Image (cartoon, rainbow, N blue to C red):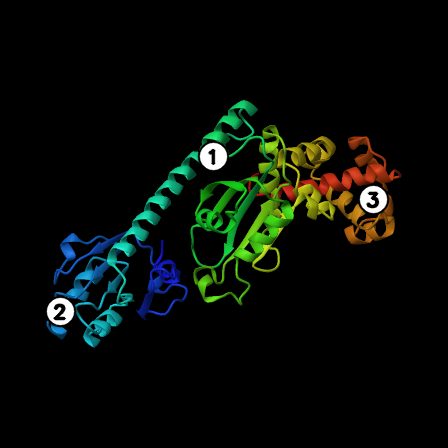
Amino acid sequence: MRLSDLLAREDLRLTPVTGPASPGDPLDREVLRAYPTDLPDPRRYLRSGDLVLTSGVWYTGPADCERFADALWAADVAGLVVGLIVLGELPRALVEACERRRLPLLLAAPDQAFGAISEVVTAEGFAAEQRRAERVRAQTLLDVLGQIPPGEVSAHLRLLGADPGLPTAAMAVTLTGGPELDLPELLHEGLTRKGRHLIVGGTPREAIVLVNGRASRKSLADELRALVPDGRGAPGDARRQGVSIAAGISEMVASVSQLGEALETARRGMESARGGPGPVSIMSVADIDSFDLLLAALPSSVRRSFRDHLLGPVEEYDARHGSELLRTLDTFLETCGSWQRTADELYVHVNTLRYRMQRIEELTGRRMSSMRDRTDLYLALRSGQAARDDPAT
């Protein structure tokens, strides 16, 4: 839980005195513990990330504010909450001391008990710890998905609170720009809905999500887009301003035996979505509208095998003889089979080109007079390009 999250809770009625909420601002600090104290110098009892709660019993004059604020700054606390039941009004010296140290200072409502604030921080801390433990268990499943039998997958899903009998979609999401944040945590917060269960794993910059239950590819895409501000986000979106992501989303699958394939589809979609326009670039099977995207959606091992089977003999011939048959084939197909244009681009005589193409036909067993054969060869050439572009290869 962050200070900005506490401020957003209407039931706590906290008012910021120092530090406006903006990306990188101290109000973005994570709160790890609430610690009430009225000691004039509590540094020995404080931890980094504490939210200090004080009624100001220690205050007798401006010098006390410097001493108290310096203790909090030295302990690297997340912030300070002051109640005014004892003080009556907030000392200006305390405000200035906190401002100089960029220490967030929050004011509690006159009738707000510190116990309520402590309970919220403690409960959220426990929930966050539970989510971290669940993420470890989720990662165990994601690491072996597609390698273990369906019965074991179902058992893992049940242990994680999911229902193997419900449809499930896979999502792969990566940060492509903006400030550092915990992407799995962000997705867990933003995609949780009634009627579904999320299984979230990955790293702070790259997350995998299994969405079990009520969802669709389109609804998940819409939710992802709503999660990342487009530059006109509300103040509550401060820590996500400037963030850009690339994502792949599979279709919902009805059987746990299909989850491994769904996850691979999502990962390939994510790689295809990198570099897409806007803060959120999403790719799925339903978005495929060109051979480039079709090839990118195939596993790299399939693309490599297809290319090697068709063009392996040509590559070997070039390697042995120092020839340019592969380049010749590429140019010929890119010029729609124009003999003269190909010869001009390669700076060779048409007869030389015809000899080369004849050799390619012999090596591949394909004929340039066949549109079907030309298509196979063209896709094989482009499969090699897709494989080189794939980080997984």
Residue that lies at the very extreme toward the left in this rendered image: 60
Residue carrying label 1: 161
Residue that lies at the very extreme toward the right in this rendered image: 369
- Mark 1–mark 3 Cα distance, whole angstroms, equals 64 Å
Per the image, label 3 sits on a secondary structure element best described as helix
Q: Amino acid at mark 3?
A: Leu
In percent of the image, x 12 and y 72: which residue is there? 63
Q: Amino acid at mark 2?
A: Tyr
- Relative horizontal placement of residue 233, taking residue 258 as reference (left or right): left
To which quarter of the image does residue 385 belong? top right
Which quadrant is the C terminus positioned in?
Answer: top right
Can you give x and y, in whole percent of width and height, for residue 136 in the image? 41, 36
Q: Amino acid at mark 1?
A: Gly
Residue carrying label 3: 353
Can you give x and y, in whole percent of width and height, for residue 186 in the image? 46, 51
- Relative horizontal placement of residue 248, taking residue 351 as reference (left or right): left
Per the image, label 2 sits on a secondary structure element best described as loop
Q: Nearer the viewer, mark 1 or mark 3?
A: 1
In the image, which disc is placed on residue 59?
Answer: 2
Residue 389 in view, yes or no: no
- Mark 2–mark 3 Cα distance, whole angstroms, equals 92 Å
Per the image, label 1 sits on a secondary structure element best described as loop
- Image: 130 above or below 312: below
Can you give x and y, in whole percent of width and height, for residue 322 in the image? 69, 39
Q: Earlier in the sequence, mark 2 or mark 3?
A: 2
